[in-house]
Amino acid sequence: MIEQAMIKVPVALRKRLDAAPDAPLLIATFGLLLLMILVFSFTAENFFSLSVLRNILTQTSIYIILGVGLTIVLTVGEIDISMGSIIGLAATVLGMTVITWGYPIGVGLLATFIVGVFCGFMNGFLTAVVRVPSIIVTLGTLTFFRGLAYLLGGSTVMVEFPPFLVWIGSGSLVGIPVPIWIAFIAVLWGYLFLKHTRIGQHLTAVGGNGEAARLAGINTRICKIIAFLIMGVMSALATIIIVARMDASQSVMGKGIELQVLAAVVLGGTSLFGGRGVILGSLLGALILSILQTGLLLSGVVHFWQLIAVGGLLIAVVAVRISREPAEGKT
Amino acid sequence: MFIETTVQASQGGAPALEARNICKNFGGIKALDDVSFQLNKGEILGIVGDNGAGKSTLIKSVTGAYRKSSGDVLLNGNSVEIENTRKARELGIETVYQASGLVEVMDAPSNLFLGREKIQSGWLGQAFGFINRRKMRSETVDLLKTVNIKVRNLSAPIRNLSGGQQQSVAVGRAAYWQGEIIILDEPANNIGVDQQRAVLALIERIRETHGVSFIMISHNMDHIFKVADRVIIMRGGRKVGDLRIEDTTREEVVGLITGASLA
């Protein structure tokens, strides 16, 4: 992946690449992904089979969906580490609505989204209007939402959800598992939203230079609230898939998920400092992490080494990227 | 205020912009104390003053970037209420801010159309707000041609351009949006000498071709005396001088800035 830019590129291709500034990054990241698949198809037995890849994709769909949300939050120059607790709270509410109180699944799904929107709005409001830094806001809501979830649900495991939810978790559409479809739609939507809509353009501007965006007449507060709302909605989507796949809900769900999602998004090239969000990169980042973990597991590598590999890879990729950056623009 | 009105009457036709008795307080601090000025049509008005004299605060209070504490703003003789920068732009006042006016990580077309993106004409574009990058790009090419800026890669972040080119994009943006009044905050600060000259030439060219009135804040006496028709001098939040360039000297202006001489 490092050699990518050193190869002499023909003029026509050069022009196309110029028109798509994210292309070299995506090509390099995709190359890394392919390389890993290649390596593991030798070291891990049965790795390169449709069912294993399908499984990996299904598992990763949750991280991909959350990655879309976090990419948008990072693009606007903020961060959200509370998503795991939003999932815990939303899963508890979903379980209580459908199992404890016996409402139809439609009501349960609606309640899940309401929780997501509420939590996202709370994060956004505290960040954009009350102006508490988002790392502190979401550090606070990380425990706040989790506490609410425990308060409501205790440690009860709620099981036996209606068939429709189970279908979301383990059903297929045209041979492709439903979670993959949902993740696909989330990525497609996130990409179009961030790169090709006016609001997406404004979010990027706010993260790139908030003062310039404000002076250009963009409402920076609303942009930030929108980003956190999207994160909340994506958390609700992820909740539905998690609960559906396990056919169970519990207040402890989603714990610790934020670090994996953050790692995936950063691997994908999104800037932690705002102004650059690469949705397709987050997709690739999530896949790389999953394949690395599954591949090492299937190759019989001890769990501790998996942790070391994931952390090492994250730092190495970002280090390579940073070392290449200054050369890019200076004339 | 009464003096201003007589000046205006003697010239026939209302000034493009008139500010009357502008005050701005930050907490207990009086940043602007009863400042009035006018900008005549087609004029380049310089604003000079030491750091903290209230130059930027004055234009920000007039254009709605800050909420002024009191005072009135008139455009072409009509009193207007400018609550925010969006309103200012709707009224034809474009401001080029010092350094912070561009989003450095975004490309030139995105910056040119920042906050006013072109939307696809189909129903999909209207419903979801899909932006028309192709159109934004081609209009950027035209604009850059008219202001004589060469950019190799239009999709590259604007931070890859030189300071002078960035400033030219910012000034060009103001002209593109057909501001009747363009306000420049230190337009040629922190850029190379050649580029400073290019930006000043661009300002004069835009005045010729578009009939725009300019307000130009600057530290640089050479720039003021090169392009401005009139200059007002700020000190400690007050206006301490209002002079035609042809009737004054650098020594006099510098004296007013430092407080060595009094008007």
Image (cartoon, coloured by chain):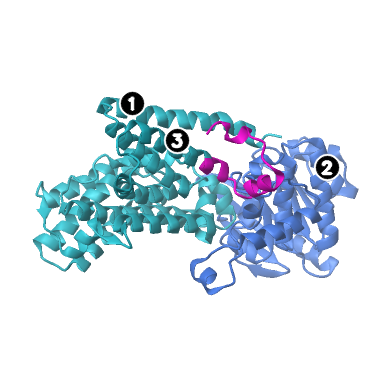
Question: x, y (%) of residue A268?
Answer: 45, 41
Image-based side of A54 in relation to A33, left or right? left
**Image mark count:** 3
Residue under numbered circle 3: A35
Tell me where the magenta segment starts and ends, as one range.
Answer: A1-27
The tint of chain B in the picture is blue
Quarter of the image containing the C terminus of chain A? top right
Q: Residue at x 50, y 59 (%)?
A: A199
Residue under numbered circle 1: A308
- Chain with cyan colouring: A
Give the chain of mark 1: A
Q: Residues within 10 Å of mark 3 (few under 14, many from 20)?
A: some
Q: Residues within 10 Å of mark 2 (few under 14, many from 20)?
A: some
Comparing A316 with B193, the one in front is A316
Question: x, y (%) of residue A80?
Answer: 36, 45
Q: Is residue B89 visible?
A: yes
Q: CA distance from mark 3 to mark 1?
A: 19 Å
Q: Is residue B101 visible?
A: no
